[in-house]
Amino acid sequence: MSRSYFVYILTNTSRTLYIGVTNDLHRRLTEHQQKLIPGFTKKYHLSKLVYFEEFSDVYETIAREKQIKRWSRSKKIALIESANPGWKDVSPQLLTY
């Protein structure tokens, strides 16, 4: 059985960005949306999933997360808008993913 790992980007109404990595996107998103974990996402109400990528290798996933975090804000926005021009919450898609 192969594992899946995800890099994801959350935002809020102010378009503050949070980039994270997880092996269970459904669970992690629920934690963010229900504000179960103290920290940046809870403080800034980041719960809208606007972008994610799936990987089969954890090291590749972490490297991608670090790469995106080093980018300028404008490059991160371009990445989001390349897949999600309307910045819609794509978390409902996870129900069928």
Image (tube, rainbow, N blue to C red):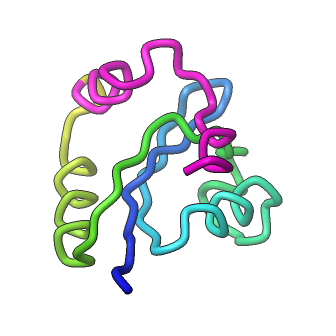
Magenta-colored stretch includes residue 54: no
The answer to whether 40 appears left or right of 6 in the picture is right
* Residue found farthest to the bottom: 1
Task: Tell me if residue 45 comes above or below residue 83 in the rendering.
Answer: below
* Residue found farthest to the front: 1
The answer to whether 84 appears left or right of 65 in the picture is right
Q: Nearer the viewer, residue 82 or 39?
A: 82
* Residue at the image position 22 percent from the left and 60 percent from the top: 66
The spot of residue 20 in percent (x, y) is 43, 60
The spot of residue 50 in percent (x, y) is 52, 34
The answer to whether 18 appears left or right of 12 in the picture is left
The spot of residue 1 in percent (x, y) is 38, 86
Task: Tell me if residue 36 comes above or below residue 10 in the rendering.
Answer: below
The spot of residue 27 in percent (x, y) is 66, 69
Magenta region, residue range: 75-97
Q: Mostly what secondary structure, the magenta segment?
A: helix
Q: Nearer the viewer, residue 59 or 4?
A: 4
* Residue at the image position 64 percent from the left and 42 percent from the top: 91
* Residue at the image position 27 percent from the left and 77 percent from the top: 58
The answer to whether 57 appears left or right of 30 in the picture is left
Q: Nearer the viewer, residue 92 or 74?
A: 92
Labels in figure, total? 0
* Residue at the image position 27 percent from the left and 58 percent from the top: 65
Task: Tell me if residue 73 comes above or below residue 49 in the rendering.
Answer: above
When asked about the image quadrant of residue 42, the answer is bottom right
When asked about the image quadrant of residue 80, the answer is top left
* Residue found farthest to the top: 86
